[in-house]
Amino acid sequence: MIFETIITSVDAYNKPHVTPFGIRYEGDLIVISPFKPSTTLDNILAAKCAVMNLTDDVRAFAGMLTGRQPLALLAASKVKGFRLADSLAHAELELVDVRDDATRPQLIMKKVFEKTHKSFQGFNRAQAAVIELAVLTSRLNRLPKEKVMSEMTYLKIAIDKTAGERELEAWSWLVEKIENFYAAQSGENFA
Protein backbone atom coordinates (compact mmCIF):
# COMPACT_ATOMS: atom_id res chain seq x y z
CA MET A 1 0.00 0.00 0.00
CA ILE A 2 1.31 3.43 -0.92
CA PHE A 3 0.50 6.55 1.11
CA GLU A 4 0.73 9.97 -0.52
CA THR A 5 2.77 12.44 1.53
CA ILE A 6 4.92 15.52 1.14
CA ILE A 7 8.61 14.85 1.78
CA THR A 8 10.93 17.66 2.77
CA SER A 9 14.68 17.20 2.61
CA VAL A 10 17.69 19.52 2.68
CA ASP A 11 20.90 19.76 0.71
CA ALA A 12 24.40 20.37 2.10
CA TYR A 13 23.61 24.10 2.42
CA ASN A 14 20.35 23.43 4.31
CA LYS A 15 18.29 24.51 1.28
CA PRO A 16 14.90 22.78 1.49
CA HIS A 17 13.47 20.60 -1.24
CA VAL A 18 9.73 19.88 -0.97
CA THR A 19 8.06 17.25 -3.13
CA PRO A 20 4.98 15.02 -3.23
CA PHE A 21 5.98 11.45 -2.50
CA GLY A 22 4.30 8.08 -2.17
CA ILE A 23 5.76 6.10 0.73
CA ARG A 24 5.27 2.58 2.11
CA TYR A 25 5.39 1.26 5.64
CA GLU A 26 7.33 -1.82 6.69
CA GLY A 27 6.23 -2.22 10.29
CA ASP A 28 7.43 0.93 12.05
CA LEU A 29 9.81 1.83 9.22
CA ILE A 30 9.04 4.11 6.28
CA VAL A 31 10.27 3.27 2.78
CA ILE A 32 10.93 6.10 0.34
CA SER A 33 11.83 4.99 -3.21
CA PRO A 34 12.95 7.93 -5.35
CA PHE A 35 13.88 7.50 -8.98
CA LYS A 36 17.53 7.97 -9.95
CA PRO A 37 18.55 10.72 -10.38
CA SER A 38 16.56 12.91 -7.99
CA THR A 39 17.11 15.75 -5.56
CA THR A 40 15.25 13.86 -2.83
CA LEU A 41 17.58 10.88 -3.21
CA ASP A 42 20.71 13.04 -3.15
CA ASN A 43 19.52 15.04 -0.14
CA ILE A 44 18.51 12.06 1.99
CA LEU A 45 21.72 10.18 1.23
CA ALA A 46 23.77 13.25 2.19
CA ALA A 47 21.81 14.46 5.24
CA LYS A 48 20.66 10.99 6.41
CA CYS A 49 17.24 12.42 7.28
CA ALA A 50 13.98 13.84 5.92
CA VAL A 51 10.56 14.96 7.12
CA MET A 52 7.31 13.30 6.08
CA ASN A 53 4.35 15.71 6.06
CA LEU A 54 0.70 14.64 6.06
CA THR A 55 -1.82 17.08 4.66
CA ASP A 56 -5.36 17.03 3.35
CA ASP A 57 -4.84 20.25 1.37
CA VAL A 58 -4.36 18.91 -2.14
CA ARG A 59 -3.13 22.31 -3.29
CA ALA A 60 0.20 21.32 -1.70
CA PHE A 61 0.52 18.42 -4.17
CA ALA A 62 -0.74 20.34 -7.20
CA GLY A 63 1.18 23.50 -6.32
CA MET A 64 4.52 21.74 -6.21
CA LEU A 65 3.95 20.11 -9.59
CA THR A 66 2.85 23.37 -11.21
CA GLY A 67 5.15 25.89 -9.53
CA ARG A 68 2.35 27.57 -7.60
CA GLN A 69 1.64 28.34 -3.98
CA PRO A 70 4.97 28.38 -2.17
CA LEU A 71 4.59 26.45 1.06
CA ALA A 72 5.50 27.93 4.42
CA LEU A 73 8.08 25.86 6.28
CA LEU A 74 9.10 25.61 9.93
CA ALA A 75 12.28 24.12 11.36
CA ALA A 76 12.10 20.44 12.25
CA SER A 77 12.42 19.55 15.93
CA LYS A 78 14.90 16.64 15.94
CA VAL A 79 16.45 16.36 12.47
CA LYS A 80 18.17 18.78 10.13
CA GLY A 81 15.43 20.13 7.92
CA PHE A 82 11.95 21.57 7.73
CA ARG A 83 8.30 20.62 7.98
CA LEU A 84 5.23 22.12 6.36
CA ALA A 85 3.76 24.85 8.54
CA ASP A 86 0.25 23.91 7.48
CA SER A 87 0.04 20.14 7.85
CA LEU A 88 -2.13 17.72 9.75
CA ALA A 89 0.95 15.98 11.13
CA HIS A 90 4.60 15.40 10.45
CA ALA A 91 7.20 12.76 11.24
CA GLU A 92 10.92 13.41 11.35
CA LEU A 93 12.89 10.54 9.85
CA GLU A 94 16.45 9.22 10.00
CA LEU A 95 17.97 6.98 7.34
CA VAL A 96 18.74 3.50 8.70
CA ASP A 97 19.37 1.48 5.52
CA VAL A 98 19.62 1.77 1.74
CA ARG A 99 18.52 -1.00 -0.61
CA ASP A 100 20.26 0.05 -3.79
CA ASP A 101 18.62 -0.37 -7.17
CA ALA A 102 19.60 0.91 -10.62
CA THR A 103 16.27 2.73 -11.03
CA ARG A 104 14.60 3.23 -7.63
CA PRO A 105 16.64 2.58 -4.50
CA GLN A 106 14.69 2.05 -1.29
CA LEU A 107 15.58 4.42 1.54
CA ILE A 108 14.60 2.83 4.84
CA MET A 109 13.74 5.48 7.41
CA LYS A 110 12.78 5.37 11.09
CA LYS A 111 10.68 7.92 12.92
CA VAL A 112 12.59 9.87 15.55
CA PHE A 113 9.87 12.42 16.25
CA GLU A 114 6.24 12.89 15.24
CA LYS A 115 3.55 15.40 16.04
CA THR A 116 -0.10 15.91 15.15
CA HIS A 117 -1.04 19.53 14.46
CA LYS A 118 -4.70 19.31 13.36
CA SER A 119 -7.41 16.69 13.33
CA PHE A 120 -8.39 14.91 10.13
CA GLN A 121 -11.89 15.95 9.04
CA GLY A 122 -12.68 13.02 6.75
CA PHE A 123 -12.29 11.83 3.19
CA ASN A 124 -13.36 13.77 0.12
CA ARG A 125 -13.50 12.00 -3.24
CA ALA A 126 -12.32 15.16 -4.99
CA GLN A 127 -9.13 15.13 -2.91
CA ALA A 128 -8.40 11.61 -4.16
CA ALA A 129 -9.10 12.70 -7.73
CA VAL A 130 -6.65 15.59 -7.44
CA ILE A 131 -3.98 13.28 -6.01
CA GLU A 132 -4.49 10.84 -8.90
CA LEU A 133 -4.26 13.66 -11.44
CA ALA A 134 -1.12 14.93 -9.69
CA VAL A 135 0.48 11.49 -10.11
CA LEU A 136 -0.46 11.48 -13.80
CA THR A 137 0.91 15.01 -14.18
CA SER A 138 4.22 13.99 -12.66
CA ARG A 139 4.51 11.26 -15.32
CA LEU A 140 3.46 13.08 -18.49
CA ASN A 141 6.75 12.21 -20.18
CA ARG A 142 6.21 8.50 -19.47
CA LEU A 143 2.50 7.95 -20.09
CA PRO A 144 0.55 7.92 -23.37
CA LYS A 145 -1.58 11.01 -23.87
CA GLU A 146 -4.70 8.86 -24.36
CA LYS A 147 -4.29 7.30 -20.90
CA VAL A 148 -3.83 10.68 -19.22
CA MET A 149 -6.81 12.21 -20.98
CA SER A 150 -9.16 9.27 -20.37
CA GLU A 151 -8.23 9.08 -16.68
CA MET A 152 -8.61 12.84 -16.33
CA THR A 153 -12.12 12.60 -17.81
CA TYR A 154 -13.07 9.88 -15.34
CA LEU A 155 -11.52 11.69 -12.33
CA LYS A 156 -13.44 14.86 -13.19
CA ILE A 157 -16.65 13.09 -12.13
CA ALA A 158 -15.50 13.22 -8.49
CA ILE A 159 -14.42 16.85 -8.92
CA ASP A 160 -17.82 17.83 -10.32
CA LYS A 161 -19.69 16.04 -7.52
CA THR A 162 -17.60 16.66 -4.39
CA ALA A 163 -14.95 19.37 -4.81
CA GLY A 164 -14.62 22.37 -2.55
CA GLU A 165 -12.68 25.55 -3.35
CA ARG A 166 -9.25 24.05 -2.53
CA GLU A 167 -9.84 20.99 -4.72
CA LEU A 168 -11.18 23.09 -7.61
CA GLU A 169 -8.14 25.36 -7.47
CA ALA A 170 -5.69 22.43 -7.36
CA TRP A 171 -7.52 20.66 -10.20
CA SER A 172 -7.39 23.77 -12.41
CA TRP A 173 -3.62 24.10 -11.86
CA LEU A 174 -3.03 20.49 -12.92
CA VAL A 175 -5.33 20.69 -15.94
CA GLU A 176 -3.52 23.83 -17.10
CA LYS A 177 -0.14 22.09 -16.76
CA ILE A 178 -1.38 19.08 -18.75
CA GLU A 179 -2.87 21.29 -21.46
CA ASN A 180 0.35 23.30 -21.74
CA PHE A 181 2.44 20.12 -21.89
CA TYR A 182 0.48 18.68 -24.81
CA ALA A 183 0.20 22.05 -26.56
CA ALA A 184 4.00 22.39 -26.43
CA GLN A 185 4.41 18.88 -27.84
CA SER A 186 2.04 19.46 -30.74
CA GLY A 187 2.73 23.13 -31.31
CA GLU A 188 -1.02 23.71 -31.19
CA ASN A 189 -3.37 25.60 -28.95
CA PHE A 190 -4.88 22.87 -26.75
CA ALA A 191 -8.21 24.58 -25.96
Image: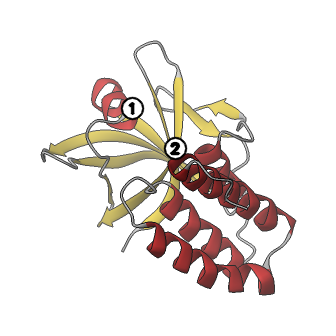
Viewer-nearest residue: 123 or 127: 127
Q: Which amino acid does label 1 sit on?
A: Thr
**Is residue 174 shown to the viewer in this render?**
yes
Q: Which of 49 and 173 is in front in this view?
A: 173
Above or below, comparing residue 134 to residue 9 in the picture: below
Residue 19 - label: 2
The three-letter amino acid code for the residue at tag 2 is Thr
Q: Which residue lies furthest to the top in this view?
A: 13
Are circles 2 and 1 on residues that touch, CB within 8 Å? Answer: yes
Q: Give the residue drawn at x 74%, y 78%.
A: 159
Q: Is residue 142 left or right of residue 83?
A: left
Residue at the spot of label 1: 39
Query: Looking at the picture, how far across and down is residue 150, in whole percent?
Result: 53, 80
Q: How many marks?
A: 2
Give the side of residue 167 with respect to residue 53, left or right: right
For label 1, the crowd category at 10 Å Cα-Cα, with few meaning under 14, some 14 to 19 and many 20 or more, is some
| Image quadrant in which the N terminus is located | bottom left
Residue 115 in view of the camera: no
From the viewer's perspective, is residue 105 above or below residue 74?
below
What percent of the width, then of the height, locates residue 178? 60, 57
In which image quadrant can residue 3 be found?
A: bottom left
Instruction: Check the image and report above or below for 42 versus 150.
Output: above
Element at label 1: helix
Disc 2 element: strand
Whichever of labels 2 and 1 marks the residue nearer the N terminus, that label is 2
Quarter of the picture containing the C terminus is bottom right
**Residue at the image position 67 percent from the left and 32 percent from the top:** 74
Q: Nearer the viewer, residue 1 or 175?
A: 175
The residue located at (40%, 43%) in the rendering is 93
